[in-house]
Image (cartoon, rainbow, N blue to C red):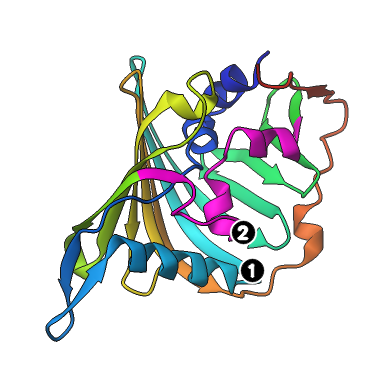
Amino acid sequence: MRVGALLRRCGLLPAAALLAAALGASALLSFGQGSSLSAHELAQRVDRHYNRLHSLRAGFTESYEGLGIQRTESGTLLLLKPGRMRWDYNAPAGKLFLLDGKYAWFYSRGDSQVQRIPAKELDDLRSPLRFLLGRTELEKELDNLKLAGAADGSFTLTGQPKGPENSPDKRVSRLTLTVTADGAIAGIEIEEADGALTRFTFTGEVPNAPVPAETFHFTPPPGVPVVDAMPPV
């Protein structure tokens, strides 16, 4: 099974395709007492916010609409640098995506196998998880980045992931980050070229939460085989 098909099947393709972004807009929005905020400045705030983190805990809601499918899921996100991420789903219960720094693991309770892919190949897909890992600069990843106001004093940064025409990034026609004034990502919206739309909303972010390293060790359930996913084409 190709990586794209695997991630779509697991409900994670839009997340895995999301990660790229660079800047090009110079729009200014009113901010504070007569001052203004540019897309460039807000992108830098996002970079600084996540580059300074050692760990993170947050709740998330994920919704997907496309290919005749509508799905809403939720759970808890845990992050520990370098390169470790865990998405524990409580709806549906038992679904897990885990990045241990070496491999990405995909498993849902009751599945007949565990799917595994080398972390470096997931990075090749420019996973949006890199935003939260603080391993990139928005201005080097998104084309035509634009700034707009959003509800509750937040802002949106919208752009198109960079990449060759035949790369997985080109599956994404639009990427929008909802960002607070201090650079925290409150939401991610990904529109794919085929019209599919995925939204992630993050709540209750706890920066530098105590997260034991063992949390990111995955042991397959007894009797469940591990299947290596094929590298992207």
What x and y, as percent, mark residue 79? Answer: 63, 60
Residue at 52% from the left image edge and 26% from the top image edge = 164
Q: Nearer the viewer, residue 121 or 61?
A: 121
Residue at 82% from the left image edge and 25% from the top image edge = 224
Q: Residues within 10 Å of mark 2 (few under 14, many from 20)?
A: many
Q: Residue furthest right?
A: 223
At label 2, the amino acid type is: Leu
Cα distance between the residues tagged 1 and 2: 8 Å
- The relative height of residue 53 versus residue 23 in the rendered view (above or below) is below
Image quarter of residue 197: top left
Image quarter of residue 105: top right
The quadrant in which the N terminus is found is top right
Magenta stretch: includes residue 42: no
The quadrant in which the C terminus is found is top right
Q: Are marks 1 and 2 in contact (CB under 8 Å)?
A: yes
Q: Residues within 10 Å of mark 1 (few under 14, many from 20)?
A: many
Q: Name the residue carrying label 2.
A: 78
At label 1, the amino acid type is: Ser
- The relative height of residue 148 versus residue 141 in the rendered view (above or below) is below
Residue at 68% from the left image edge and 74% from the top image edge = 210
Please state the extent of the stretch shown in magenta in the rendering. 117-143
Q: Secondary structure at mark 1?
A: strand
- Disc assigned to residue 55: 1
Q: Is residue 209 left or right of residue 81?
A: left
What x and y, as percent, mark residue 117? Answer: 75, 30
Q: Nearer the viewer, residue 41 or 100?
A: 41
- The relative height of residue 71 versus residue 188 in the rendered view (above or below) is above
